[in-house]
């Protein structure tokens, strides 16, 4: 053959190759579109046509099978999908990697179709066929373990599978940590909290970078459950402190701090628990709900020690922190109980409850007739030195934003400075964006005003001022700012 003839043949081959590439791109896009449109039957017809056209290219055969199988799975045609994957393996005989992919695709299809027995058998086939394929077998063990855990509820069988994952292949850290969490979940359900906690600790210490945060959040929540159910205070307290230090979400940090403090209390370490609750309040003053929950536990601790003067002082703070109707009712009940506990004086407890119901003007709402006094008025706020220092340190760290004003408001409440707190609630309302406006208004009135005046009656003028300003609800004007009378 002449040089010129050879060049001509090469040019012709190049043209054929280019045309084949164009055909592949066109056919591939058409098959992909059929899949995306959930037209699985048409996708099968098109894919099998493409098998004939591109039979000599194993990579293209694989891509065709993937799209056909995916189309069937999207249409929940599980048997068809399994058949597609089996056909693919038959088209590339002797290709071990292709057969492994086919078996895994078949098993995953049975799993996704909730056909548990078939899925278990399909993953077992992988283990029997390729016992030395470490990563493939580890995945099969993991899948069998989670099917037993989440679907058949055979927890011992699940543990038996999952314990082999790390032994089979420890290179994939995400897979190993998933196996550890699965085993921990099984132990927790089977009432073995110590075994569960040990595994959760391993995940949350050694594999913290190998799972998404929402998965780790579940492991943290289950760790708390294991600690509480097993009363594992010796291991639990330092572990909760570790989680609290690592956590970046402030709301969950405060929750972990509360659980750590509760664990100290449950273990009988009352002084340490009181200190821990105070640390939580000083560290997380933006988390109003947890401020209240911590305070409730502090009151209970003083009651347990029969130190009723201290419990009443802290109950007064609990009433201040109550930020919704349910908590206000609860706080009033606790305050009344503390008033009675001091000397058994039920009349004083009832007088407090009546004052909360009717306010200083009494039942008729008229001054000078059956006016009522607040039994809490003469009760002083707590003044423990360590606690005060923590709160003052927290106060010094606040910023100039609406969040900083909110923190200062609650810290001032905890320090027994209700008027300073009221001024900071006003600042928060002035600085906050629209998304937080309703919360700021609610706290200004239901926490700030309630605490300064000592009761929740007569709050409507405050809400009217926030809603209508000087115009008032009737739009006629002449309304004055009721907050200034308290400040």
Image: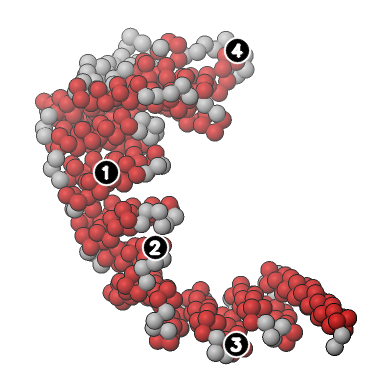
Circles 2 and 3, Cβ within 8 Å, touching? The answer is: no
Query: Residue 438 location in percent, x, y?
Result: 51, 30
Q: Which residue is drawn at 14% across and 28% down?
A: 308
Q: Residues within 10 Å of mark 3 (few under 14, many from 20)?
A: some
Residue 223 versus residue 365: which sits nearer the camera? 223
Residue 360 is at least partly visible in this image: yes
In the rendered image, which quarter contains the N terminus? bottom right
SS at mark 4 in the image: loop
Label number found at residue 77: none
Q: Earlier in the sequence, mark 4 or mark 2?
A: 2
Q: Earlier in the sequence, mark 2 or mark 3?
A: 3
Name the outermost residue toward the front.
2
Foreground mark, 4 or 2, reads: 2
Query: Residue 256 location in percent, x, y?
Result: 31, 44
In the rendered image, which quarter contains the C terminus? top left
Residue 117 versus residue 108: which sits nearer the camera? 108
Task: Write down the residue under mark 1.
Answer: 241
Q: Earlier in the sequence, mark 3 or mark 4?
A: 3
SS at mark 1 in the image: helix
Residue 450 is at least partly visible in this image: no
Q: How crowded is mark 2: few (under 14 residues within 10 Å), some or many (20 or more)?
A: some
Circles 3 and 1, Cβ within 8 Å, touching? The answer is: no
Circles 1 and 4, Cβ within 8 Å, touching? The answer is: no
Task: Write down the residue under mark 4.
Answer: 477
Q: How crowded is mark 4: few (under 14 residues within 10 Å), some or many (20 or more)?
A: few
Label number found at residue 92: 3
Rounded to the nearest angstrom, the CA distance separating label 3 from label 1 is 56 Å
Rounded to the nearest angstrom, the CA distance separating label 3 from label 4 is 86 Å
Task: Write down the residue under mark 2.
Answer: 173
């Amino acid at each position: 053959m002449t040089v010129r003839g050879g060049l001509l043949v090469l040019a012709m081959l190049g043209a054929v190759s280019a045309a084949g590439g164009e055909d592949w791109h066109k056919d591939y896009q058409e098959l992909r579109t059929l899949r995306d449109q959930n037209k699985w039957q048409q996708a099968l017809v098109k894919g099998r046509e493409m098998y004939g056209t591109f039979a000599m290219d194993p990579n293209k055969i694989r891509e065709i099978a993937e799209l056909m199988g995916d189309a069937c799975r999207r249409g929940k045609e599980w048997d068809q999908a399994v058949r597609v994957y089996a056909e693919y393996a038959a088209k590339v005989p002797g290709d071990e990697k292709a057969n492994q992919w086919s078996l895994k695709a078949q098993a995953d299809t049975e799993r996704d179709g909730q056909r548990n027995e078939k899925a278990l058998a399909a993953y077992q086939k992988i283990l029997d066929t390729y016992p030395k394929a470490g990563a493939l077998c580890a995945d099969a063990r993991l899948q069998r373990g989670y099917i037993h855990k989440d679907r058949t509820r055979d927890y011992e069988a699940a543990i038996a599978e999952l314990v082999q994952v790390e032994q089979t292949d420890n290179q994939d850290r995400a897979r190993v940590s998933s196996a550890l969490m699965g085993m921990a979940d099984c132990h927790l359900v089977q009432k073995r909290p110590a075994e569960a906690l040990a595994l959760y600790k391993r995940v949350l210490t050694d594999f913290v970078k190998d799972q998404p945060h929402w998965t780790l959040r579940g492991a943290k929540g289950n760790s708390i459950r294991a600690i509480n159910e097993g009363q594992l205070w010796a291991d639990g307290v330092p572990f909760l402190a570790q989680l609290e230090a690592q956590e970046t979400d402030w709301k969950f940090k405060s929750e972990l701090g509360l659980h750590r403090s509760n664990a100290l209390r449950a273990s009988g370490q009352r002084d340490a628990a009181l200190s821990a609750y105070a640390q939580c309040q000083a560290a997380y003053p933006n988390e109003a709900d947890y401020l209240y929950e911590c305070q409730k536990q502090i009151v209970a601790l003083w009651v347990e020690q029969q130190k009723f003067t201290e419990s009443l002082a802290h109950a007064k703070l609990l009433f201040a922190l109550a930020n919704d109707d349910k908590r206000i009712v609860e706080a009033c009940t606790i305050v009344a109980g503390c008033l009675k506990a001091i000397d058994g004086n039920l009349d004083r407890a009832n007088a407090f409850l009546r004052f909360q119901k009717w306010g200083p003007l009494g039942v008729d709402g008229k001054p000078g007739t059956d006016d009522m006094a607040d039994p809490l008025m003469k009760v002083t706020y707590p003044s423990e030195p360590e606690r005060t220092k923590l709160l003052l340190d927290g106060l010094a760290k606040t910023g100039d934003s609406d969040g900083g004003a909110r923190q200062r408001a609650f810290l001032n409440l905890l320090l027994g400075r209700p008027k300073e707190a009221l001024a900071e609630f006003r600042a928060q309302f002035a600085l906050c964006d629209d998304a937080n406006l309703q919360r700021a208004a609610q706290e200004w009135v239901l926490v700030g005003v309630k605490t300064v005046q000592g009761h929740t009656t007569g709050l409507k003028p405050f809400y009217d001022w926030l809603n209508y300003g000087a115009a008032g609800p009737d739009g006629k004007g002449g309304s004055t700012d009721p907050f200034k009378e308290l400040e």
